[in-house]
Image (cartoon, rainbow, N blue to C red):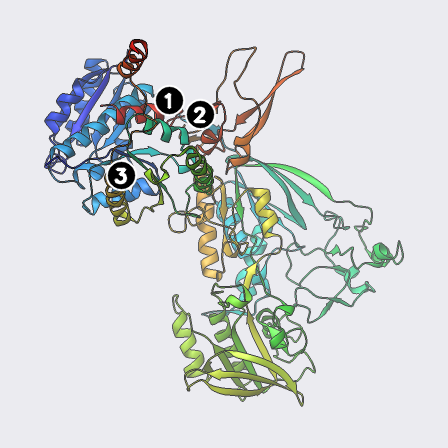
Amino acid sequence: MARIGVFICHCGENISATVDVAKVAEKAGKLSGVAFSVDYKYMCSDPGQTLIIESIKEHKLTGIVVAACSPRMHEGTFRKAAEKAGINPYLCEMANIREQVSWVHPKSDATTQKALDIVRTLVEKVKKNVALFPIKVPVTKTALVIGGGIAGIQSALDIANAGHKVIMVEKKPSIGGHMSQLSETFPTLDCSQCILTPRMVEVAQHPNIELLTYAEVESVSGFVGNFDVKIRMKAKSVDMKKCTGCGACSQKCPTKKIPDEFNEGMGFRTAIYSPFPQAVPNKPVIDRDHCTWFTKGGKCGLCKKICPTGAIDYETQDEFRDVKVGAIITATGFDLKHADFFPEYGYGQFKDVIDGMQFERLASASGPTSGEIRRPSDGKIPEKIVFVACAGSRDKAKGIEYCSKICCMYTAKHAMLYKHKNHEGKAYVFYMDIRAAGKNYDEFVRRAIEDDDVNYIRGRVSRIYEKNGKLIVKGVDTLMNSEPVEIEADMVVLATAVVANIGAESLAQKLHISYDQHHFFSEAHPKLKPVETNTAGIMLAGACQSAKDIPESVSQASASASKAIGLFSSDELTREPIVAVVNRQAPPNFTSCTGCLLCMEVCPYHAIEKEEIKDRAGNLIKVAAHVNAGLCQGCGTCVAMCRNKSIDIQGFSNDQMMSEVMALLNS
Amino acid sequence: MSEQFEPKIVAFVCNWCTYAGADLAGTSRTKYATNVSIIRFPCTGRIDFMLLMKAFENGADGIIVSGCHPNDCHYTSGNFHARRRWIVFRSLLDFMGFDTDRITFSWVSAAEGTKWASLVDETTEKIRAKGTFTEFKKLDYSTLEKLSNDAITK
């Protein structure tokens, strides 16, 4: 027989001013199953909690209802008090008679009656409550970082420095990401590689970090603290242990005319290559799509002959590695919108219309022009450059409504770099708005305009075409009555839109994390959970979530790392037991579940799996649903979906909800 | 003059948006009718529509179902399931000749305290105008007895 205690709080006068608390306490005391009922000025205060604890002990209560504020406010407080009194904390419920009664209704009989109705409802619910115990899951204290750009590097180093193992997976032959391609960085104009490469080396040499380059995530299963990840190690054709990175192979490789991705196609590389001089690891791989040994069936073989350590092996195949990790940080970065997207700007048609990343390579000391800004068509130094901001961004017609965020700043930087190298040159920037919110950002743009004499024209460019060896840029100046502007430029740089990485969607599907319509990964909450995803244990870092600059990517990476470190701070994870359970029965029935698996289809967390129930001889008896408590977040969508009530959710069970409905309506 | 009819309305709401929105109405001291009482669910996706029928059977005159706005669901997609289920359920009720206006389906976010208050007031007025819900009511034992007695005496 249930012995329920009801505790009515006055909350000073917050409740008692409009609700007749004494009457509620009196009437509640007469409800069936209620063994004790009392009202008190402040239930959440120390004496209030002591009253609850003492009453539970004295009256041998089997459950309590605290009628006070919202459970969102003090549920934790009172559950702890219940626990202190020696009963299971989940045998405590709160009746919200402040936020949803006393604060929204005037003093009246109806208000008191509503408070009583709610108390009765919760009394009936708590009678059906059962003791629940926090779910403990073990934690594998290793993190997987997907992506070796600046965000991934920051996360990996933070976690590794906190003393945990990290596995970093990078799909390219070297880590470094987009930042390694940049010339200088805003707003300080310090050299990108100078600040990045030491961190790349640190990653490679860190005893806690295992670096897997030329590798991709193949599949992910499991749940927070216990992910099983299969990693595809693409065949490098070079034995990393034997290779010393001398570079003799790339020098002798006869296939020399492959467009160099690192230089954004403005240069060539060989088939056996290391992407850039400071690459980490600085050991080459063979690009099998271009190497004649692979394309022409065993011809050439020069690199193998020349390699002093015998590291070349054409026979290697893709290999798979299975790893167990407790947390995953996704730092896969971004891409820029490419050529065919801008036919009106002649991008991809005119050699001297380039994008921002190509300009970075031109301005970079390690780039194809050794840092001299020369136009790609004839290598001449341009006298006039037009920069077009928002090329694609904030353009509904292009399907990209969002702001790419970094372009205002890097365009100002590009214009400055150009002016610093060519004092006589003229730089024009077409822009929509200047968005330079950030520490020292607006000052930086003002420097470009005021000190470096960059011409900023507010307006959009409608068309770019070639005439007499010049690029004619036609646009308008909206600050001059929208007068048409025409500039004869030698080179045009488009600040093309930041877009999600190719393959982002398929990775999201492997990880079971959500992504937005532009394929950027979605955070769990835009404000309060900006680095977590909806899948517990998977965090986001950098531009894979949305367009971000370096400082923002780094801060998010550190935030993600701290989430992983927090996760690793104990050997076991404790989770709220508000999870779905499949009803179990004694053999030969085992469960009432018929195995229709509608629940599996609607579960947003992929927490429900098919379970095969077998007898001792191993014969299949039936197929039923099984809930993985580690993944279940307790939404209960499966419960409403189940046709024969075989699945239920703890804390909000069918029994509890039905009791509430009945109690509320049957006074 | 008789007292005005006070309908009984049950609100089935999700914990993360509408329950928090109703709390916000409280913290903002926004006044509204006393006729609506809330039952808290983790998510609108959890709401089994049989519970709605049970509520009507047991004397509810109207029902509100409310959760997070589309795309705002704490559990990503629970509210979409609720919406889909509601669309199917509504046409079934329609087919049965049930007055579906007695059920109000709405989205109220955690920031929409005033929306919650006006939803409650509007729904109360609407149901008040409709009067007591009499169809599909559970027959109590005495009514059953009377009915059978009547049948016998006839």
Chain for disc number 2: A
Residue under numbered circle 2: A648
At label 1, counting other C-alpha atoms closer than 10 Å, the crowd grade (few under 14, some 14-19, many 20 or more) is: some
When the figure is inspected, residue A481 is found, relative to residue A231, above or below; the finding is below
When the figure is inspected, residue A540 is found, relative to residue A67, above or below; the finding is below
Where residue A43 sits: x, y (%)?
A: 17, 30
**Residue B124 visible within the image:** yes
Spatial CA span between label 2 and label 1: 9 Å
Residue at 47 percent across and 69 percent down: it is A186
Toward which corner of the image does residue B129 lie, by quadrant? Answer: top left
Q: Regarding mark 1 in the picture, which secondary structure is present there?
A: helix
Image quarter (top left, top right, bottom left or bottom right) of the N terminus of chain B: top left
**Label 1 near label 2: C-beta < 8 Å?**
yes
Amino acid identity at mark 3: Lys
Left or right: where A37 falls relative to A383: left
Same subunit, labels 2 and 1: the answer reads yes
**Residue A89 visible within the image:** no
Amino acid identity at mark 1: Asp
Of the pair A225 and A347, the residue shown nearer to us: A347
